Amino acid sequence: MRDDYDFSDSKPNPYAKHLKKQITIRLGTDVIAYFKKMADETGVPYQSLINLYLRDCAATGRTLTMAWESEEDAE
């Protein structure tokens, strides 16, 4: 191995800024438990599983539909 390396012609990685970005997100404890259990079963870190799920939602254009039940429907 050399003592010195010449990086004068090197260029920054153009893809580095697109890899991942650290954020803060609040998730329910039940959601975290679900993904941690899945992580134990698959051997994939739970944060990676959450990222994969959200990436799949974005890629397929999945949208959230919310319909509240009325009191009459619940009975």
Image: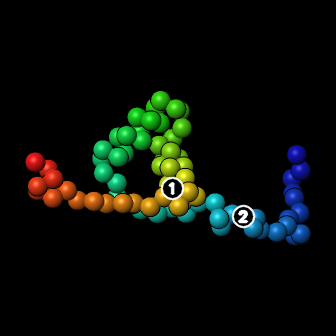
Q: Earlier in the sequence, mark 1 or mark 2?
A: 2
Q: Farthest top residue?
A: 41
Q: Is residue 51 visible?
A: no
Instruction: Pick the residue in front: 35 or 24.
Output: 35
Measured from the top left, where is residue 57 in percent x and y? 51, 56
Label 1 is placed on what type of residue?
Answer: Cys
Q: In the image, is 33 to the left or to the right of 5?
A: left
Residue 39: mark in rendering:
none
Residue 15: mark in rendering:
2
Mark 1, other Cα within 10 Å: few <14 / some 14–19 / many ≥20: few
Instruction: Pick the residue in front: 40 or 13.
Output: 40
Residue at the (31%, 60%) spot, across then down: 66
Label 2 is placed on what type of residue?
Answer: Tyr
Mark 2, other Cα within 10 Å: few <14 / some 14–19 / many ≥20: few
Q: In the image, is 17 to the left or to the right of 61?
A: right
Question: In this figure, which colouring scheme has been used for the structure?
Answer: rainbow
Residue at the (58%, 58%) spot, across then down: 59
Residue at the (39%, 60%) spot, across then down: 64
How far apart marks 1 and 2 lie (CA) works out to 22 Å
Identify the element where label 1 is drawn: helix
Measured from the top left, where is residue 53 in percent x and y? 50, 49
Residue hosting label 1: 57
Q: In the image, is 31 to the left or to the right of 61?
A: left
Name the image quarter holding residue 36.
top left
Instruction: Pick the residue in front: 4 or 39.
Output: 39
